[in-house]
Image: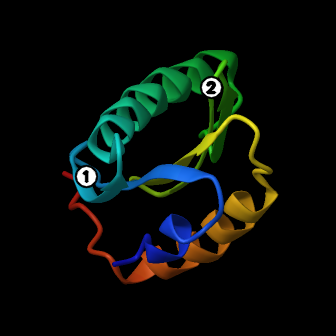
Amino acid sequence: MKIDALTELPGVIASALVGPDGLPIEASGDGGDVLAAELTALRTVLDRLGRRLGAGEVSRIALTSERVEVVAITSGEYVLGAALSRSSDTRHAQQTLAKLVLELGDLPRPDRA
C-alpha cells in the first residue's frame, strides 16, 4: 500500500489516499474512510476558495482541532492525508507526505473531456 509509511509514524491514527472520484484508493486506521471523505470535501471547498481569491490550486491542507491534527497534500486530482493525535509532532508526517506524493505519478490520471 502506498500509505504504509504514514501508518507507521508515531501518533498517526488514520491515513487516506483519495482518488479523483472522491473515493478512497487506500485508507487505514480508525477513521480512515471518514478521513478520505472529509479530505474530499475540504479539497472541494478550498479549491473554490482558491479560485475565487485568484490564489490558484490548493497544494497543502493542515488543520488542528481539540484532539486531532490533520495534514494533507495534493497531487493533481489526488489527496493524500493523515490524522494524528493532537500532541503529535506533524513534521515527520508532512515530510512523509511530500515523499509519498512523488510516487503518485504512477497512478492513472483521469481523462479530461
Q: Secondary structure at mark 1?
A: strand
Q: Answer few, some or many: residues within 10 Å of disc 2's Cα (few below 14, many 20 plus, some between 14 and 19).
A: few
The image shows residue 53 at horizontal and vertical percentages of: 68, 17
Name the quadrant of the N terminus: bottom left
Query: What is the basis of the colouring in this image?
Result: rainbow
The image shows residue 41 at horizontal and vertical percentages of: 38, 26
Q: Mark 1 highlights which residue?
A: 24
Q: Secondary structure at mark 2?
A: loop
Disc 2 + disc 1, Cβ < 8 Å: no
Q: Amino acid at mark 2?
A: Arg
Q: Residue at x 49, y 49 (%)?
A: 13
Q: Residue at x 62, y 67 (%)?
A: 9
In the image, which disc is placed on residue 67?
2
Instruction: Out of 111 and 1, give the one closest to the viewer.
Output: 1
Q: Residue at x 25, y 52 (%)?
A: 24
**Which circle's residue, 2 or 1, is located before the other in the chain?**
1
Q: Is residue 45 left or right of residue 95?
A: left
Distance CA(mark 2)–CA(mark 1): 23 Å
Q: Answer few, some or many: residues within 10 Å of disc 1's Cα (few below 14, many 20 plus, some between 14 and 19).
A: many
Q: Does 93 sit above or below residue 106? A: above
Q: Residue at x 65, y 21 (%)?
A: 65
State how many labels appear: 2
Q: Amino acid at mark 1?
A: Pro
The image shows residue 91 at horizontal and vertical percentages of: 80, 57
Q: Is residue 94 left or right of residue 4?
A: right
The image shows residue 113 at horizontal and vertical percentages of: 19, 51
